[in-house]
Amino acid sequence: MSERTDRLHRKLETELGPVVRNALADADVVEVDINPDGQIWVDRHGVDLAMIGVMGSQVVMSLICTVAAMSDRVVTPTAPILEATLPDGSRFHATIPPITTAPAIAIRKHLSQALTLDDYVRQGVMTREQCERLRRAVANRENIIVAGGTGSGKTTLTNALIEEIGRVNPGHRLLILEDTPEIVCHNPNRVAKRTTVEVDMRGLVRSSLRMNPDRIIVGEVRGGEAEALIRAWNTGHPGGVATLHCSSAHAALGKLEEYVADAVAGDKRRGIAEAVDLVAFIERAANRRVLSELLLVKGFANNDYLTEVISKENVHVVA
């Protein structure tokens, strides 16, 4: 470690302060947020959001500048957004005026140890039936979309699915594509790729097809890369997982249609139905996360998707 890096690491520890450091060290904490008014809030598994302290605006700004320096970036009023990664792997997102009234920070913790599907059953997030259906999907190399809103736990569920891939197929070569590294993967044969200013997610998907992948994992689908991913899943690269922001399991298919349309013209719903086997919709309900739906995509007929829903409570068919 260089003298400059060592100095910045020490400065970071000081500026984080004991309240934030202790929160980041808490295994139950998922996210730490510092609002423009200086209030520090934490999001813990199974507990309502809680305010745990206050940080002065000057300290918050200094902390942002320190993280920017560690990432060889600068933050200014004309470049007021910082996306970076802390030394422990946590995702660091910060904004400064004029887009916020004062400096603000959101730190999404990096999990070094992924939950398993059995952990989700024990915690009441999913039923045993849902767990076994997801296991079968992984073993059969079905393509899975993990859908939900912001903070619903999509990445954590994706990590659990990757753990299951490692249990069933430890030798599979995984290509993991992300904007910001959040996915935890212990498979020995893995290649992690990140987007840059020059290479977007669509470019990463296309590049990955030339790297002999057994499975392609996409941290988040949010644009034209959906077309490249659907094409890859339909042409000999099954068993992938991708996350997507939406409000329901059915809405995930509509979102994919929109994103594919960003890249190519025409009705691509049949191709989506052929590529996507299952949509797992996870959401925050009260103070806990729940896998409220598994949407099984059976095909496409009569101008609509043929689906079956395994909900948290029961099983019913929607044709």
Image (cartoon, rainbow, N blue to C red):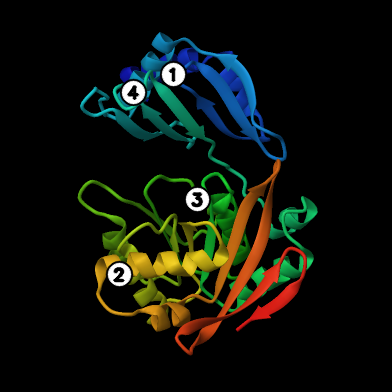
- Give the quarter of the image for residue 279: bottom right
User: Does 214 appear above or below 153?
Assistant: below
Which one is nearer the viewer's eye here, 246 or 156? 246
- Element at badge 3? loop
- For the residues marked 4 and 1, what is the alpha-carbon distance in whole angstroms? 18 Å
Q: Is tag 3's residue or tag 2's residue first in the polypeptide sequence?
A: 3
Which one is nearer the viewer's eye here, 218 or 70? 218
Which one is nearer the viewer's eye here, 226 or 3? 226
Disc 3 + disc 2, Cβ < 8 Å? no
Looking at this view, name the residue that lies furthest to the bottom: 302
- For the residues marked 3 and 2, what is the alpha-carbon distance in whole angstroms? 27 Å
Label 2 amino acid?
Answer: Ala
The N terminus is located in which quarter? top left
For discs 2 and 4, the disc positioned in front in the rendered view: 2
Image spot of residue 16 (x, y percent) = 50, 18
Label 4 amino acid?
Answer: Ile
Q: Is residue 236 visible?
A: no
Q: Which mark is residue 261?
A: 2
Q: Is residue 199 left or right of residue 184?
A: left
Q: Is residue 302 visible?
A: yes
Label 3 amino acid?
Answer: Ile
The residue beneath circle 3 is 183
Label 3: few (<14), some (14–19) or many (≥20) C-alpha neighbours in 10 Å: many
User: Residue at image x 50%, y 13%?
Assistant: 55
Disc 3 + disc 1, Cβ < 8 Å? no
- Element at badge 1? helix
Disc 2 + disc 1, Cβ < 8 Å? no
Disc 3 + disc 4, Cβ < 8 Å? no
Q: Which mark is residue 12?
A: 1
